[in-house]
Amino acid sequence: MTDLGEVRAGLEAGLRAAVRGEVAFDATARALTTMDASNYRRVPLGVVAPRDADDVAAALSVCREHGVPVVARGGGTSIAGQATGTGVVLEFTRHMNRLVSLDPEARQAVVQPGLVLDRLQEAAAPHGLRFGPDPSTHSRCTLGGMIGNNSCGSHSVAWGTTADSVQELSVISGRGDLLRPGRDWAGAPEGLRALVDGELARLRTDFPSLSRLPRRISGYALDALLPENGADVARSFCGSEGTLGVLTEAVVRLVQAPRARALAVLAYTDESAAAEAAAGLLPYRPLTVEGMAADLVRESAGLPRGGAWLFVETGGDSSAEARARAETVVRAADVVDALVVADPAAQRTLWRIREDASGTATRMPDGAEAWPGWEDCAVPPPRLGAYLRDFRALLSAHGLRGTPYGHFGDGCIHVRIDFDLMSDAGVARFRRFSEELADLVVSHGGSLSGEHGDGQARAELLPRMYGQEAVRLFERAKGVWDPDDLLNPGMLVRPAPLDSNLRFAVLPRKPVDVAFGYPEDGGDFSAAVRRCVGVAKCRTTTAGSVPATGSAAAPVSGVMCPSFRATGEEEHSTRGRARLLHEMLAGEVVTDGWRSTEVRDALDLCLSCKGCRSDCPVGVDMATYKAEFLHHHYAGRRRPAAHYTMGWLPVWLRTVARLRAARLLNSLAAVGPLARLAKRLGGIAVEREIPRLAREPFSRWWARRRLPDGAGAGDGAGTGAGPVVILWPDTFTEYLSPSVGRAAVRVLEEAGLTVALPPTAHWERAPIGDGRSRTPRDAIGQLGPLARRNRVCCGLTYISTGQLDRARTVLRRTLDLMEPVLDSGAPIVVLEPSCAATLRTDVPELLHDDPRAAQLAARVRTFAETLAQQAPHWTPPVLNRPAVGQTHCHQHAVLGDTAERRLREAAGLTGELSGGCCGLAGNFGFEQGHYDVSKACAEEQLLPAVRAATEDAVILADGFSCRTQLEQLAGRQGRHLAEVLAGALEERPGRTRGPDEDLGEGLER
């Protein structure tokens, strides 16, 4: 018996000799391709990224020689398991991703299989054209994958499926034959025509009509080979899931895009009422008829009142025409309520609810997990309402829950169901339900798949839809195209059982011992990692996603995933890192557990921006997973130098301040050889400048302020007659940007608030009474002989470097100091967004056993939130100037920026801030080996926006990292919003600044 290792070694050597593209058999490459977006997992032998069709042919030849199967893979977003395999994976997105040509006159494009759909849409848009089908994964799915699955999307009622848009294909068969499938038997492999001619009657009777069932995607489209259908070999190839041949190029048709669009949102009492209404709207020739129910909408989203909605899009040559058509639809519909939206940006906001449903649906409202498997059944549109009622009844009979949504106009339903796929009993119920649901779909004249293909999830059940004879015909067709069964075996014909190869089977059955609490995942790290279902929104190439409708709406600002956009590598995407963590827990491919170098290297370029926490539809929080991993990975081991320098930054800066050595260190840092030596020893990138330390820390300035009664402020309150707010002296404000703190004090007091700093004394007397109470404190900051001085700290630098034991120590000390503040009820103003986000989310999750952590998190406010809540009637100075910059990534992901937007608007600061991440991201951009990625992130949106700004524009950057990145890469000074407002206050006519109001250092006037 041949050893698997020998087979792998011989295969790898053969591929390296024959293929010019990349050949990867390492653990990382294999781990990244074990799964797609389905419930299934297969471990490949290796991955090949072919450069061209010759590489594909060479790879197929080597694999055929070794008897190893081949799977073609695009974006890896397939939901039925067809993008996984045990042999060699052909990865097309790396090289074969070009738009070869675009002919606006002929309305045609020639594309390679790895081209992402949005890139084709962007190229076609200037000509008023577009590719008709548009799945919700349009920003990362590939044309090859769409052809393989016969994908559809929300506009199929207008422009059909991918098969309707394909004209001609270039295909390499399993035996290396070069074929050009098209109409009139063009490109048919030898024997296919004879097979069809002998089965004409069956093809005419056993295949449901596409006019009655437009979303019939299941099985092979052999009826497209009938003479009355033009003997269209290309159309028949669509939806074959890579089992018949390997696509290397395609000629596709484009359609005229309407110049304007309007969106009618129709509200109904429930989803069945919406489903029954959908078919009646088709005569009005809408572009889309999409449906979803209230149990998929987790919060108010501006939808009209109702329990379910239809999203009906209309087009026209003008906005007025499109709107008139939408209003006609509303008048024709029997609705509870309705909304017509013509503004592109408002449409985009509503469409995002629908697009994110594929991820949102993976969690029930109570947080329980839900899975694909019956993701896209389709029935004739007039049967949809009745089918949904029966479907809900079947769910109830099995004690299951799901949230249906989808393409109601085509009778296609998406749903994630809360199957228990971790236990034997749950898997058995999954099988019973699947068999009964297949029968239910067939009883309504439907198709088991209406968009995503059969894969392993449904292929076993195809005899229930087509009958055994038709399925045997599928097997014969497969044999004509691929007699050696080399291409994606186990899909569509001779399938693996639907309850085998489940990706959950390899995960540990007991919770892993971890530091964070993972409250949304029941404290289970495995469940947190399982959140990633592979929808791959993190693989987009822009920080905002292009509207699926192709309208002129501005992209929605986003952050996730800056490292992927900088490198284009799957391992540096959120999904890739989650896959590696999954394999780490499984222990089969990644075998070193927490000591894994594969996981460490993939996480190394994670900026901990937390963009995935908000932008990922399923709420993956890779920053937390990274901190968790680093905590275990370096336990009892020496860490990288940067962990000691930048991880312990609060300690070093506090020491410098106590020694009053800032001026000396700034001078030494200006000496080239000394700076280079310090950077090398400290693990800091040589390209970076060491930030200058403030000559006077913020708290020292605070202590010397002259109050009206002449007393020193200390920890006590400053001037102001209004409510007390506690200003958090974060490390960056305290030692590096005290001008931000001084400006914030100036503005907060101008707004009538009383500003105080947190206590710096922790009482150390023995407990009294109940063993927990300590000597009472009468006022914030009161000192005594038995008090120990210290400073509060959010622990950010320790958390981001995975030093979680140290972080806990620091945070418990902070909570001890903050107890009187927590008792007082005063809000806590945090000026640095990353520190505010840490206090609001990381601290309660890390100290999940300490109720004070949650109390502290609940008190945290941003600068703008404080003014909005504590001084609602205060009017800021009006600047009437444009503003540019970037919303801090943690602000976007954790805190939200509604209050900041309103404050900017009230201050006359116009314009939108860009999305993305500045790329410095705390310690990340300073660490050795990160400079190029850090710079690439900044060049994506931030730096171009600043360079294009007018001279009078205000450059806003609330984060210290963002300001540092701007200064070091663009030579421009960004300012915190507090600094901008404070500067405007100083410029008010007749304003005389007192000697104690030095806003000074670093504050632009």
Image (tube, grey):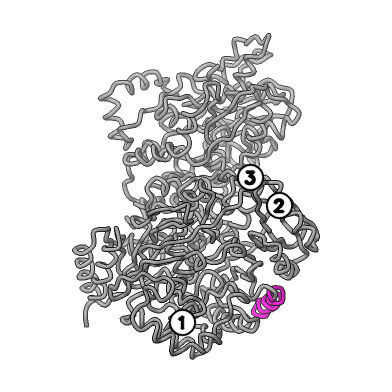
x and y, in percent, of residue 247 in the image: 37, 67
Q: Residue at x 58, y 39 (%)?
A: 816
Q: Where is the N terminus found, in terms of image quarters? A: bottom left
Is residue 515 visible in the rendered image? The answer is no
Viewer-side label of 1, 3: 3
Viewer-side label of 2, 3: 3
- Based on the displayed image, in which of its 4 quarters is residue 364 positioned? bottom right
Q: Choose between 138 and 630: the one closer to the eye.
A: 138
Q: Secondary structure at mark 2?
A: loop
Q: Residue at x 56, y 72 (%)?
A: 450
Which secondary structure is most common in the magenta stretch? helix
Amino acid type at mark 1: Pro
Which numbered circle lies on residue 345?
A: 3
Amino acid type at mark 3: Ala
- Which residue is denoted by mark 2 in the rendering? 300
Q: Which residues are magenta?
A: 383-399
- Based on the displayed image, in which of its 4 quarters is residue 134 positioned? bottom right
Q: Residues within 10 Å of mark 1 (few under 14, many from 20)?
A: some
Of the numbered discs 2 and 1, the one sitting upstream in the chain is 2
- Alpha carbon distance from label 1 to label 3: 45 Å
Of the numbered discs 2 and 3, the one sitting upstream in the chain is 2
x and y, in percent, of residue 113 in the image: 39, 61
| Above or below, 565 relative to 701 | below
